[in-house]
Amino acid sequence: RKGLYTLSSCLAHEYHFGNMNKTWTEAQRYCREKYTDLATIDNMEDMKKLINTVVDIGYNGTVWIGLKKGEWQWSLADRDYSQGYVNWEENEPNNSGGKEDCVFMRRSGKWNDAPCNIQQLFICYGIKNSKES
Ligand code: 2F8
Ligand code: CA
């Protein structure tokens, strides 16, 4: 993973639509196997790219992105949430019911925290892992 990750940071990031219902952890595992990780968003340009990935496909639902608690943390471990870009929906994150540790994106691009065990589609990030296929 380390090698892949270094290479991916030299190239333009790509987002990939995960067209399978998975929990957040299952989606993370899948993305780490096939690409680099679940979707990481560093800035507004990334955010627009990610929204377009979903809109181009014509999907109107929500998708997991690579953000999760304890403290909010990107799935890519070197990203610093507290210093980085955020795009929370108004009044989110609200930890509704006390069980919302994972984050999905709506079609608008806005983020909501939700229970990690929901199964839904997701967005992967990074280059395709040529070791798989
Ligand atoms: O009103 C916002 C609220 O909407 C839902 O709860 C009723 C969301 N839950 C799920 O998507 C499972 C909350 O996360 C969200 O804050
Ligand atoms: Ca919420």
Image: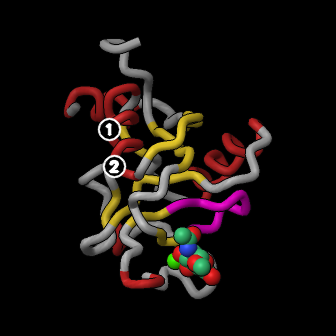
Residue at 53 percent of width and 45 percent of height: 122
- Determine whether the residue tagged by mark 2 lies in a helix, strand or loop: helix
**Residue 89 percent across, percent down from the top left:** 62, 76
In the displayed structure, 31 sits above or below 69; it is above
Range of residues picked out in magenta: 104-111
Residue at 39 percent of width and 35 percent of height: 31
Q: Quadrant of residue 72?
A: bottom left
Crowding at mark 2 (Cα within 10 Å: few <14, some 14-19, many 20+): some
- Determine whether the residue tagged by mark 1 lies in a helix, strand or loop: helix
The quadrant in which the C terminus is found is top left
Residue at 49 percent of width and 37 percent of height: 13
- In this rendering, position of residue 18 left or right of residue 38: right
Let me know if residue 88 appears in the view: no
Crowding at mark 1 (Cα within 10 Å: few <14, some 14-19, many 20+): some
- The residue nearer to you, when weighing 71 against 13, is 71
Q: Which residue is mark 1?
A: 29
In the displayed structure, 114 sits above or below 129; it is below
- The residue nearer to you, when weighing 78 against 24, is 24
User: Is residue 4 inside the magenta stretch?
Assistant: no
Q: Pointer 1 and pointer 2: residues touching (CB < 8 Å)?
A: yes
Amino acid type of the residue that numbered disc 1 sits on in the rendered structure: Arg
